[in-house]
Amino acid sequence: MEAVLAYLRRAIEAGEYAVGDKLPSEAALSKEFEVSRSVIREALRGLQALGLTVSRTGKGTFVTEPGPAEHPTFGGYSARDLVEVRRHVEIPVAGYAALRRDNAQLEELGRLAERMELETDDTAWVALDSLFHVTIAQASGNPAFAKVIEELRDALARQSAFLNQLGGRRAESNGEHRRIVTAIAEGSEAAAVAAMTTHLAHVEQALTTIVRPGRTAKQNRNH
């Protein structure tokens, strides 16, 4: 899937398929690349997630942009909007959760982390992921923080699905979530802040890699 997606993306960015052009059918692409149609469908969904194409029922897939947006949009918020807010909210929230969480909240975080590790369905995993971050905000003991993250819940879920589909983030996220839970369980504000900082840094790096392959996080910040 990754190889087909990369090929089609390069073709669009090189102008081989211009805005308004229709891509070959699933059957034609399946034959050309010698892969199943399910692989082609996943690659086409990846192009849509990048904002390069749109699928029209009964008509096919059409190119809408010559390249991915600098900051993809998730539920009305750009990737940059979410990165900035999450840095300033979720990092201190993790620290407060380590100091203020109760046993029930800690047990719930542990259950969510375990369920994510065992989950095989992408949609279910994304739902658990957004619930995990909402639960940490609730464990901070500050309802205002919880309300902010709840407001962003749909956008966070959309971003999570995008990263899983195009960046293969699930396994890495599971490990990062476990480290966050461990730090909160230990009651270490510093460790919880560090674990959440690392998690969000990896999210930002993955977004940069997907949207601008080969571009470093440092270059992204400088621009």
Image (tube, rainbow, N blue to C red):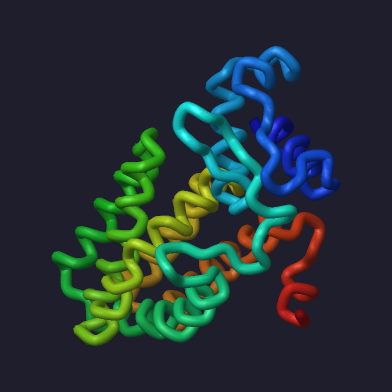
Q: Where's the C terminus, which quadrant? A: bottom right
Of residues 49 and 15, the one nearer the viewer is 15
For image coordinates 60% across by 16% down, the residue present is 36
Report the side of 183 relative to 25 (left or right): left
Q: Where's the N terminus, which quadrant? A: top right
Q: Is 66 located above or below residue 22 in the figure? A: below
For image coordinates 34% across by 59% down, the residue present is 130
Q: Position of residue 123 (x, y in %)?
A: 36, 42
Q: How many marks?
A: 0
Report the side of 22 relative to 156 (left or right): right
Q: Is 161 located above or below residue 182 in the figure? A: above
Q: Position of residue 200 (x, y in %)?
A: 53, 69
Q: Is 94 located above or below residue 142 in the figure? A: above
Q: Is 187 located above or below residue 110 in the figure? A: below
For image coordinates 27% across by 71% down, the residue present is 150
Q: Position of residue 139 (x, y in %)?
A: 23, 75
Of residues 37 and 91, the one nearer the viewer is 37
Is residue 11 at all visible to an observer of this figure? yes
Is residue 178 at all visible to an observer of this figure? no
Report the side of 135 relative to 170 (left or right): left
Of residues 47 and 136, the one nearer the viewer is 47
Q: Position of residue 199 (x, y in %)?
A: 52, 66
Q: Quadrant of residue 131?
A: bottom left
Q: Quadrant of residue 105?
A: bottom left
